[in-house]
Amino acid sequence: MIKSFRKIKASKPYNHEELFDLIKDKPFIAGIPELSGKGLFKTINFPAIGRHQVQIKCSKSKIMIIAGEDRSQFAKNLGMNTAIRGMSDVADTLSSDRKQVINQVGITASELAAMDL
């Protein structure tokens, strides 16, 4: 089974802004990171592929890299799921876009781990 998330233990606690400052100029397979959201919803996002994107979330000294849904398209995706009663979720799980983003999660996690954060 392919994991849609990876965890990295950092040498010190980072918040999203500190981590973003460290990685914003680094090349990643997933693209150029950007900081978005507020409070609990703050994430570091990479460019979306279809409905999905690689996202980074921080909690103390843990860094989680996940295959998340593109938040800029959230309302559209929610409307589509409601209209066809969740069937798009089933098809989406099997989509090549999601598989590509899940693959990028693993590679991005390796790239972050190599930075010795």
Image (cartoon, rainbow, N blue to C red):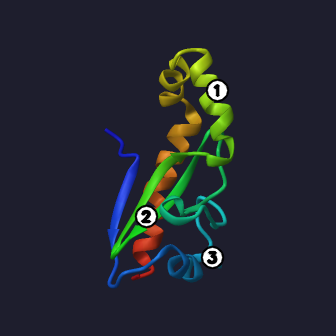
Between marks 2 and 3, how big is the CA–CA gap? 15 Å
In the rendered view, would you say 55 is above or below 92?
Answer: below
Between marks 1 and 3, how big is the CA–CA gap? 33 Å
Between marks 2 and 1, how big is the CA–CA gap? 32 Å
Whichever of labels 2 and 3 marks the residue nearer the N terminus, that label is 3
Image position, residue 77 (x, y; %):
63, 32
Q: Residue furthest front?
A: 39
Whichever of labels 1 and 3 marks the residue nearer the N terminus, that label is 3
Q: Residues within 10 Å of mark 3 (few under 14, many from 20)?
A: some
Give the quarter of the figure containing the C terminus: bottom left
Which residue is identified by label 1?
79
Residue at x-position 68% and y-position 41%: 73
Image position, residue 62 (x, y; %):
34, 70
Residue 109: assigned label: 2
Dot in front, 1 or 3? 1
Disc tally is 3
Residue at x-position 31% and y-position 38%: 1
Residue at x-position 55% and y-position 82%: 22
Whichever of labels 2 and 1 marks the residue nearer the N terminus, that label is 1
Q: Amino acid at mark 2?
A: Ala
Dot in front, 2 or 1? 1
Image position, residue 95 (x, y; %):
55, 30
Image position, residue 113 (x, y; %):
40, 73
Q: Amino acid at mark 3?
A: Lys
